[in-house]
Image (cartoon, rainbow, N blue to C red):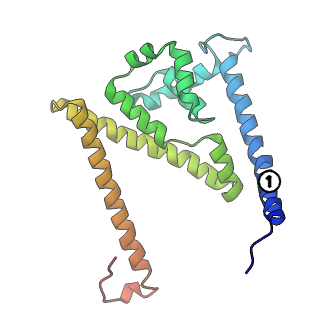
């Protein structure tokens, strides 16, 4: 073995970076144009102000009922989630533009709704750059699996947080207790899933004769 020369390392890095940019940039560029176009024009191709009446707001209004069980069925919040697919940082800026001020955003959401919204933003479909990388490495099929799989996962987990929060509020628990309770529940779920995964991995390591094996598998 010997260390590669700086020239070889640099050439390999350039080839990989160039290949990624050529493939990923195409998706990012097209997605940027699409979001800008939907946010700027209405269906009559007239320029709109502040997003009201734009194609994006109308499409977001159609999707908003999906998020109503989570507590944020407002089309402005849905628009922010759509632009967040471009970059998660866009969620905050879009909310600021559509609501007009931080005070308006705070007034539109309770503490529990804000927590549910943050959980959803944390887990839902990653940005276009990440999706482009997945497509580059694993193919278009897995990119779709990641896109919709994480979207469904985020919706389910956010709904669980909301239901748990509503239960805690109905029992008269204060906000810090609700947050701590939610964290404890998810840590317990994570530990349970990890334990099951270890057991399955241990059984798979026994070989193909697991069906006739009389020994007890251990972690």
**Residue visible at 24% across and 42% down in the picture:** 181
Position above or below: 185 against 39: below
Of residues 5 and 55, the one drawn nearer to the viewer in this rendering = 5
- Where's the N terminus, which quadrant? bottom right
The image quarter containing residue 70 is top left
Q: Hey, which quadrant is residue 87 in on the image? A: top right
Q: Say left or right for 28 vs 51.
A: right
What is the x, y in percent for residue 199?
Answer: 36, 72
Above or below, 177 against 198 in this view is above
Quarter the C terminus occupies: bottom left
Up-down relation of residue 175 to residue 144 (above or below): above
Q: Which residue is identified by label 1?
A: 19
Query: In this orientation, which residue lies closer to the viewer: 35 or 92?
Result: 92
Residue at image coords 72%, 39%:
28
The residue shown at (63%, 46%) is 130
Q: Is residue 210 left or right of residue 136?
A: left
Question: Between residues 177 and 36, which one lies in front from this camera angle?
Answer: 177
* Depicted 159 relative to depicted 45: above or below: below
Residue 112: image location, x then y, percent: 32, 29
Residue 33 falls in image quadrant: top right
- Label 1 neighbourhood size at 10 Å, few (<14), some (14-19), many (20+)? few
The kind of secondary structure element at disc 1 is: helix
Query: Residue at (73%, 11%) from the top-left corner?
Result: 46
Q: Position of residue 100 (x, y in %)?
A: 52, 12
User: Is 115 displayed left or right of 142 in the figure?
Assistant: left
């Amino acid at each position: 073995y010997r260390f590669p020369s700086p020239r070889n390392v640099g050439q390999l890095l350039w080839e990989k970076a160039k290949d990624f940019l050529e493939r990923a940039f195409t998706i990012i560029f097209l997605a940027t144009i699409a979001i800008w176009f939907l946010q700027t024009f209405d269906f009559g191709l007239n320029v709109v102000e502040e997003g009201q009446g734009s194609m994006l707001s109308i499409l977001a209004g159609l999707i908003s009922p999906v998020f109503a069980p989570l507590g944020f069925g407002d089309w402005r919040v849905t628009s922010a989630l759509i632009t967040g697919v471009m970059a998660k940082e866009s969620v905050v800026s879009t909310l600021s533009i559509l609501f007009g001020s931080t005070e308006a955003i705070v007034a539109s959401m309770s503490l529990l709704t804000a927590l549910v919204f943050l959980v959803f933003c944390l887990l839902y479909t990653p940005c276009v750059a990440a999706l482009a990388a997945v497509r580059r490495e694993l193919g278009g099929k897995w990119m779709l699996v990641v896109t919709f799989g994480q979207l469904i996962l985020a919706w389910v987990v956010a709904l669980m947080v909301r239901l748990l929060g509503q239960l805690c509020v109905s029992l008269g628990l204060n906000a810090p207790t609700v947050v701590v309770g939610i964290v404890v529940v998810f840590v317990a779920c994570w530990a349970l899933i990890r334990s099951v995964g270890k057991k399955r991995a241990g059984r798979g390591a026994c070989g193909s004769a697991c069906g006739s094996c009389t020994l007890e598998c251990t972690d």
